[in-house]
Image (cartoon, rainbow, N blue to C red):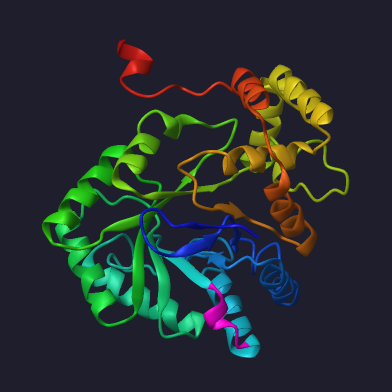
Amino acid sequence: MEYAHLGRSGLLVSRVGLGTMNFGDATDEADAFGVMDTAIELGVNFFDSADVYGGPQSPDMEKGYGTSEEIIGNWLKTSGRRDEIILATKAYQPMGLRPNDRRLSAYHLKRACEASLRRLQTDHIDLYQMHHVDRATPFEEIWQAMEQLVAEGKITYVGSSNHAGWDIATAQLTARSRHFLGLVSEQSIYNLANRAIEQELVPALRHFGVGLIPYAPLASGLLAGVPQDGAAVRRRAPEVQEQLRRFSDQIADYERLCAELGHSPAEVAQAWLLHQPAVSTLIAGSRTKEQLEVAVDTLTIDLDAATLAELDRIWPGPGVAPQSYAW
């Protein structure tokens, strides 16, 4: 396993992290325990969850939200391996039907953190992330809440997710004025087929020393290649099928290149992300031990300059603002 600093922090995280959104939904507790055991064996130390993961992700539906954290908590209790992992989770999504059971108010963050700690059966969260931007709540209030949670020993670092470049700038400048570390990471959708964040978010992250944690590295199966075992559930979704038709020529070129390289499309897609300088660790949302092993194996793939250029030709990025549209 290779490790990298999470942004400008001194914290070292495995270049491939374990995403647990499927725990409690597509992966039951017994299988999830096996995946987490395998992660430790492979040297994966970054485990990512969210308070809403594990089911329908809506509090007005059947029980499901919070299940991912509960499964992790049960594994931590039985395995005794809390000190071997960097535990990350998130808050923002509705966790109840009352008006303050969601978003990023200081009121909700305090209660959401304490609820996550109970489900996770631990006394601290290593990386506490804002799951989405909440522009109705000022960062002065958000940082006040986060500072208190740090002071109480309930969280160690703060990250964001699904934020824009100017949100990162606002957050960091506000944190600096309060003499607070601020964000160490941003988790965002990023893959060969969706490179929109390269225009403004990635430059902002690099400027402020915030590590990038990409999720959806396979674009919901678009970059996974032809499924061999019927396991590519998301690739069969209607919206992904539409994308497969829309990008059929690019996918054909891409899969031809992967065949020439001797690696699967899924391996190349993840290897490309690990070659991007802003990326600290990528989220492998593995439902099985075998999928996690494939993700970790991508660390051994070296993409040379010619291959990276060919990938840029097949899947062109948007360029960097403002040069991409003004110069």
Work out whether 181 lies above or below 76. above
What is the span of residues highlighted in magenta in the rendered image? 80-85
Rendering coords of residue 257 (x, y %)? 77, 25
Quick check: 288 left or right of 10?
Answer: right
Q: Is residue 265 magenta?
A: no
The C terminus, quarter of image: top left
Residue at the left extreme, as displayed? 177
Residue shown at the point (65%, 67%) measured from the top left: 43
Quadrant of the frame with the N terminus = bottom right
Considering every residue shown, the one lying at the far right of the view is 228
In percent of the image, x 72 and y 42: which residue is there? 301
Q: Quadrant of residue 79?
A: bottom right
The outermost residue toward the top is 327
Query: Residue 172's spot in the image, x, y percent?
Result: 23, 51
**In the foreground, 301 or 65:** 301
Q: Is residue 324 above or below residue 59?
A: above
Q: Nearer the viewer, residue 67 or 274?
A: 274
